[in-house]
Amino acid sequence: MRTIFIATLLLAAAAQAADLTVTVLDRSGKPLADAVVLVDSSAQGIRPSPVLAATIAQDQLKFVPAVTLVGLGAKVSFSNLDTWDHHVILGVMGAGGAFVDPGQNTQFRLAGRVRNKAPASDSKVLSQPGPYLLACHIHSSMRGHVYVADTPWAKLGSEDGKAVLQGLPEGAARVRIWHPDQIVDGTPTAVQIAAGGNAVTVTTQIAPARKKRAAPAADNNYPGL
């Protein structure tokens, strides 16, 4: 009898869950890629499981992916796929895209990849919510970002600026946006989650920086790797 009761409750909660499609635009009204979309809700309902593991590669003088989204307590692993050494500098990011306290940053060096051997790697558990900045002592042009979400409803927007967040309970909620190129935090957008789902467009004051292309490195491509 208890099993039937629990199943009934789960079905009722699932029936009340809805999807929210968020479209993020930059200050000129164009789709903003790589925006982190966070939704806060205090309504009763099932919470999705956070992402607790991710891998970031150093490849062709870039952090790949450029933006990584995880949950609190996630283990983030780093691998160097280039044939030259890299540093990983990891620290909490503040306003204006700088480290909050360089003295508190985590730093380690990853040796360049050797043919037919596994790449050098290391990992770090992130327990503080918010944005982290990634850099390299050896190659100052390298920049990457990790965002640790403090809500179970978090999604990285695609190139068209869209993010679909699933399993939201009906009721009042708010949408927060974070982006690597923002200067200050934007004002959250209030939404009312309906049973049939919602769609909302958030226009930010963010002016995205132009992406730089890394120079090709032919000696970094080994056949058979």
Image (cartoon, rainbow, N blue to C red):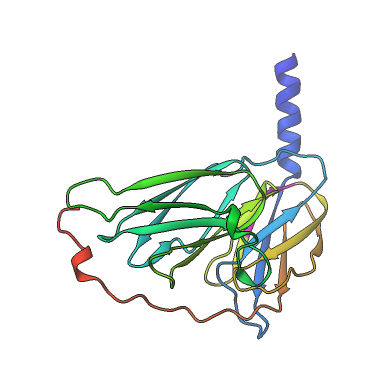
Residue 200: image x %, image y %? 73, 67
Query: Which residue is nearer to you in this view: 22 or 73?
Result: 73
The magenta span reads 164-168
Task: Work out which residue is located at the far bottom of the displayed protein and give it.
Answer: 28
Residue 155: image x %, image y %? 61, 56
Q: Looking at the image, which residue is at 29% across and 49% down?
A: 119
Residue 190 shows up from this direction: yes
Q: Which quadrant of the rendered structure holds the N terminus?
A: top right
Residue 196 shows up from this direction: no
Q: Is residue 28 above or below residue 38?
A: below
Task: Work out which residue is located at the far front of the displayed protein and give it.
Answer: 103
Residue 83: image x %, image y %? 25, 60
Q: Looking at the image, which residue is at 68% across and 74% down?
A: 183
Task: Work out which residue is located at the far top of the displayed protein and give it.
Answer: 1
Count of numbered circles in the view: 0
Q: Is residue 223 above or below residue 159?
A: above
Residue 78: image x %, image y %? 41, 50
Query: Which residue is nearer to you in this view: 68 or 183?
Result: 183
Most prominent secondary structure in the magenta stretch?
Answer: strand
Q: Is residue 126 left or right of residue 79?
A: right
Q: Looking at the image, which residue is at 20% across and 63% down?
A: 221
Quadrant in the rendering for residue 113: bottom left
Q: Is residue 148 magenta?
A: no
Query: Which residue is nearer to you in this view: 220 or 34?
Result: 220
Q: Looking at the image, which residue is at 71% across and 76% down?
A: 204
